């Protein structure tokens, strides 16, 4: 129930369609489980961390620009995951050492 609330509330707060968010969350979760062969039980949904950036991007670039940016970031995320699959975690550990990751996590 928690994931459903976040997946519906976040799009409402930023002015997007909740049914689109639910569809994208479902497709993303299915693709994730196919790629990982179901070894990680997880649901991919909306995140409250993106509310402020999405609202600001919509003010600056409009809805079309914001959605284009979200698709572009999703593509970059896909490329990074393919790079990790191909190169392993060594590349990420070299690009993002603990001194960089620490402040992000805390």
Image: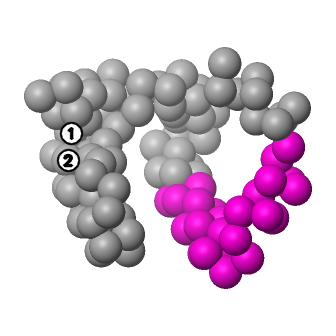
Q: In the image shown, does 92 or 61 lie closer to the viewer?
A: 92
> Which mark lies nearer to you, 1 or 2?
2
- Tell me residue 31's x, y (percent): 31, 69
Q: In the image shown, does 96 or 39 lie closer to the viewer?
A: 39
* Crowding near the residue tagged with mark 2, few <14, some 14–19, many ≥20 C-alpha atoms within 10 Å: some
- State how far apart marks 1 and 2 are (Cα): 6 Å
Q: Residue furthest left?
A: 1
* Crowding near the residue tagged with mark 1, few <14, some 14–19, many ≥20 C-alpha atoms within 10 Å: some
Query: At 87% from the left edge and 32% from the top edge, which residue is drawn?
Result: 99
- Tell me residue 102's x, y (percent): 76, 28
Name the residue that disc number 1 marks. Answer: 18
Name the residue that disc number 2 marks. Answer: 22
The mark found on residue 28 in the picture is: none
Predominant secondary structure in magenta? helix
* Highlighted magenta segment, given as a residue range: 71-97
Residues at discs 1 and 2 in contact (Cβ within 8 Å): yes
* In the image: residue 9, left or right of residue 95: left
The reply to whether the magenta stretch includes residue 77 is yes
Query: At 52% from the left edge and 51% from the top edge, which residue is drawn?
Result: 70
Q: Which residue lies furthest to the top in this view?
A: 106
């Amino acid at each position: 129930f928690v994931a459903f609330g976040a997946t519906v509330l976040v799009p409402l707060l930023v002015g997007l369609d909740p049914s689109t968010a639910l569809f994208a969350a479902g497709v993303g979760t299915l693709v994730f489980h196919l790629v990982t062969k179901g070894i990680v039980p997880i649901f991919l949904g909306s995140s409250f961390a993106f509310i402020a950036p999405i609202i600001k991007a919509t003010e600056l670039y409009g809805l079309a620009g914001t959605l284009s940016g979200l698709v572009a970031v999703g593509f970059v995320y896909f490329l990074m995951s393919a790079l990790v699959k191909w190169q392993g975690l060594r590349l990420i550990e070299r690009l993002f050492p603990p001194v960089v990751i620490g402040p992000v996590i805390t």
